[in-house]
Image (cartoon, rainbow, N blue to C red):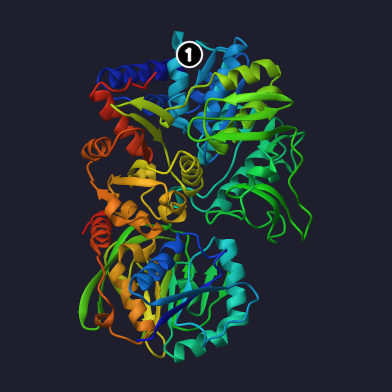
Amino acid sequence: MIRLAAGVAAAKAVGTLARTAGRGGGTSLPGKVLTRVEPDAIRHLSARLTRGSVVISATNGKTTTAAMVASILERTGAHLVHNRAGANMAGGIASTLAGAARNGGRRLTGDFGLFEVDEFWLGQVAEQVEPRAMLLGNLFRDQLDRYGELETIADRWAAIVRNRAGLVLNADDPLVADLGRNAPEPVYFGVDDDRLALPELQHASDSKHCRRCGHAYTYSAVYLAHLGHYKCPNCGQERPTPTVVATNVQLNGIRNAAFDLDGRRVELPLPGLYNVYNALGAAALTLKLGVGLDDVIAGLQAVAPAFGRAETLDLGRPTSLLLVKNPAGANEVLRTLALEGTELDLLGVLNDRVADGRDVSWVWDADWELLVGSVRSFTASGTRAAELALRMKYAGLDPTKITVIDNLEHGLDHALRSGDGPLYVIPTYTALLELRELLTRRGQAEAYWR
Amino acid sequence: MADVLRVCAFYPDLMNIYADRGNLQLLQRRAQWRGLGFELSGVGLGDELDPDAHDLLYIGGGQDRDQALCAEDMATNKRAALHHAAEDGKVIFAVCGGYQLLGHAYELDGTKLPGVGLVDLETVREDGPRLIGNVAIELELDGTRHVLAGFENHGGRTRLGAHTRPLGRVLKGHGNDGRSGFEGVRGGPRDTVVGTYLHGPLLPKNAWFADWLTATALHRAVSELKPLDDRLEDAAHAAARRAAGI
């Protein structure tokens, strides 16, 4: 325990320094210091959470889903220890715990742990946190240079969840649903709404083949990438019937979405089918924890957009930020934007830093074609601006509508001058951080670090 | 000039992991902007390949499991047609996972995936780290020096036979095996078989190479292709080179 106290003290000192130095963002540095001093710090500190912990992982939607769960749980009087800023590897989780530690780690400021966890770190974190429940939302093709192939992640997850109680799984994602195969009483959630079904699997769909026998699935409905109602005609594996179900889904551009849950209408202040899935996951998890439906719905309806996820700022013109980081997520953002009108001004920011994935090939797997008919002007910015501009050109956008300005600040100013009405900004992860720093410096956005 | 560029993509629903679609899109749009016709077809597992029906055969990359399925199928059902196509001077362009299947075999995790034997090379999965990162190579085509820039991400190490020619020399990055300093392969009976680890995808970052493939597939010189406005293409190429550090 002496090591723990020393580690917590060191982590707090580092955290204070970083904040004083004005370094924003969900820093993982204090946690790295803490686990250097006490490798089992996450285990020791999370054991002090008297109401236990839950963990959330997925390729897309972790931060938003966790924000929804927080909004629901806080209504039930839970005092959360939550890695809200999205630092979701072991260091970030240790930082969050260090921040909540009092009295050398003998006490925490909260009683309930809510942790979003990077797909790759799920095993290590789950082993230390020993969560009461684990919500697994989806698996999509993502930064291959960092994460490797999708099947590899699915195999890792299968080893982690084998025989684990408390699983909350997306029935519509065959890779995720199959994780419940050997688990005691998993809870499944899914969408039932034929009007939403796409005509065919999107190009970026990855999991087209049965996890058990390798045969191609047949889909009676495809909702999003490889999510939908599927069945293997060879071995008979099929979508498990979910108990938490969204029906009668209505999508209103980038503004909001609504759906029926257990006979009640949920007005979600976040857009897109992807957020309906996030909300379903959050509902399934909290219902499983014993929260009543009234609190679940009220919590979902009160959630605010997470940082850069369909957040709208006033920059002279209303400017919406929509993070994109992989083909499946980008497709949902593009599909949602296409509902917004036909004369859109867009600023796309493509960076290729480590946290974005150094490999920018994913922009060629996303369906930018969805937007081409709706674009009035497209400004491309970021370290790989030209590649994004080229993608738009080959998607069919008239090159005279495209401007390439590598420098983000100049790109933003150009885009802001490109017309009136709303501006839509589609940044990759580090571009979003840069943008936020830029806007904070100009006094146009609050610092997001809390 | 032939009016139509006929492209056949191998296993388009399985071997497409690194945005192989981008390579096909470059070939398609550029043909259309030049007023050439463009036909894209695909061959899947169990399908027969008609070697006379296409000018350019494209083999992309896939996840290990899908690659294994395709390797067996290609060796069983398409090997003879591929050799026939190569002898007729059809362009066979293979990237990453597809490249690994052009030679004799790909050995990984104690199993041996069969290759189609179009070129003398062998690939082995080693215990070492995957070879990942931005990459640039230098090559000579028709007497002119060019640079290809892209991204590589492969566990396999490819070794060329003693008389097999690489596609290029590594300027930055790992290349075939991280040691030899060579990248890719160019060979076959009419020198029209091209394999490379460069994706990212390759052709959008190197539009000039898309044109070389197109011209070769149509048995023409690149200079016979109608020039296009390539300012964005050139900027993307420059950015890819910068990313690789040259």
Q: Nearer the viewer, residue B138 or B219?
A: B219
Q: Residue A144, relative to residue A407: is it above or below? A: below
Q: Which residue reaches farthest right?
A: A236
**Disc 1 packing (10 Å; few <14; some 14–19; many ≥20):** many
Q: Give the quarter of the image for residue B170.
A: bottom left
Q: Residue at x 23, y 24 (%)?
A: A442
Q: Residue A288, image x and y in percent?
A: 71, 24
Q: Which amino acid type corresponds to the residue marked 1 in the rendered image? A: Gly
Q: Residue A224, image x and y in percent?
A: 59, 46
Looking at the image, can residue A295 be seen? Answer: yes
Q: Residue A389, relative to residue B230: is it above or below? A: above
Looking at the image, can residue A350 be seen? Answer: no
Q: Residue A53, image x and y in percent?
A: 60, 22
Q: Is residue A202 left or right of residue A380?
A: right
Secondary-structure class at tag 1: helix
Q: Residue A43, relative to residue A325: is it above or below? A: above
Q: Nearer the viewer, residue A290 or A95?
A: A290
| Parent chain of label 1 | A
Q: Is residue A179 left or right of residue B2?
A: right
Count of marks overlaid on the render: 1
Q: Residue at x 50, y 63 (%)?
A: B16
Q: Residue B160, image x and y in percent?
A: 39, 78
Residue that mark 1 sits on: A105
Q: Give the quarter of the image for residue A139.
A: top right
Q: Is residue A225 left or right of residue B200?
A: right
Q: Nearer the viewer, residue A436 or A177?
A: A436
